[in-house]
Image (spheres, rainbow, N blue to C red):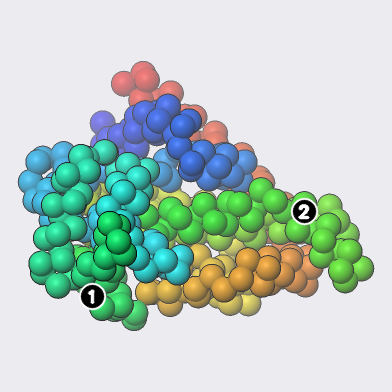
Amino acid sequence: MSERSEIEQLLLENAKLESAQIINSEFKLVDKIIQDFAPEIAYLYQFREDQSEEQHIKTGRLHENRILGIILKFYLEGKNKITTGEVEQEYKKFFKEIARSTISTYLNMLKNESTLFKERDGRTVYYLFYEEPPHGISAFWFTRIFCIIPAYFDRALYYSNIYINAEKSIVQYIKDFDIGDKDILIRNFKFITGLIILKIFKNRCSKCILCQFSKREIYNKLEEIIKVAVKDRSDVLSEEINENLLEKYSEIPMFGGIAENSRENIIEKIIRAADEFKKDLDFQIMVSLRRRDLRLKQKKAIEEQNLDS
């Protein structure tokens, strides 16, 4: 079996494992959207496994990296003060669970290193960034300090909630502005939002490749797979949609993306694009559906080949 096939088989095996684990996760919604919008990458997109953890090396630095990534997620949501309990709850959403005492130990180590500082409110202890996380820094150096998985997965969940409520948003828009065809607007709105979610995971993979703890060969392959899914759904769209909407809304602020302002503004921006670029979207959706069917056939062929080998 070629190296490429071995990596694909590992991703597929992990996909089957993750499919059982995601049932009780709040990210079940994200998975539902992916299966609806891009079933050819179902489960694959969520792969997250670290070389260091598997080999039991540099795990202390790995835990610090992940904890800072969790605090970064809260920071991007506008929440600057985090308790040990909140970090513990978030940690087990994204990674293999570790003891609360371990989390507390690393929070205090980060405080002693002046990366974080403590603030007390009665009996409650909060942890805050000593300085704000950097913007415009190379992703290579950023991932040396912060695990970006929580921030990107949380962003995907945010847009998944927008996707699932597409009809409600469109109905309100038509009521307010008295324009547009409801069914077409819903279809286009979901297509644009689905693309944003796909690009979020593509952006996440491109950062995980740079992480000192990651399985780079697997993340390289995963990024390649998701890039194909994105290209299949965006290559005939206008530059204005691709660059001014998809790129900005799918990236976190540290790397040039926009910070979510108000949910209403984001929804309105997507709806206006869904209305303004109806012709482009109509052709792109037709093309992408054909390509999706082809990718699903290719995926099935790989699975059957792996079963036979």
Quadrant placement of the N terminus: top left
Residue occupying image coordinates x 84% and y 52%: 183
| Residue 210 location, quadrant | bottom left
Q: Is 144 on the left or on the right of 75, as rendered?
A: left
Q: Identify residue type, mark 1.
A: Tyr
Residue found farthest to the right: 178
Asked whether residue 201 appears in the rendered view, the answer is no
Numbered mark located on residue 130 in the image: 1
Lower sequence index among marks 2 and 1: 1
Quarter of the rendering occupied by the C terminus? top left
- Which of 189/300 is in front? 189
Q: Is residue 126 above or below residue 308?
A: below
Q: Can you identify the residue that label 2 sits on?
A: 168
Mark 2: give few (<14), some (14-19) or many (20+) Cα within 10 Å. few
Q: Is residue 275 above or below residue 298?
A: below
Q: Are marks 2 and 1 in contact (CB under 8 Å)?
A: no
Residue 276's disc number: none
Q: Residue 86 location in percent, x, y?
A: 34, 51
Q: Secondary structure at mark 1?
A: loop
Residue 309 vertical placement versus 268 (above, below): above
Q: From this viewpoint, which residue is outermost toward the bottom?
A: 136
Residue at the image position 42 percent from the left and 41 percent from the top: 44
Q: Nearer the viewer, residue 209 or 54?
A: 54
Separation of disc 2 and disc 1 at Cα? 41 Å
* Residue 158 percent location from the top left of the image: 54, 56
Task: Identify the residue at horizontal 19%, vertical 58% (top origin).
Answer: 107
**Left or right: residue 169 compared with residue 64:** right
SS type, badge 2: helix
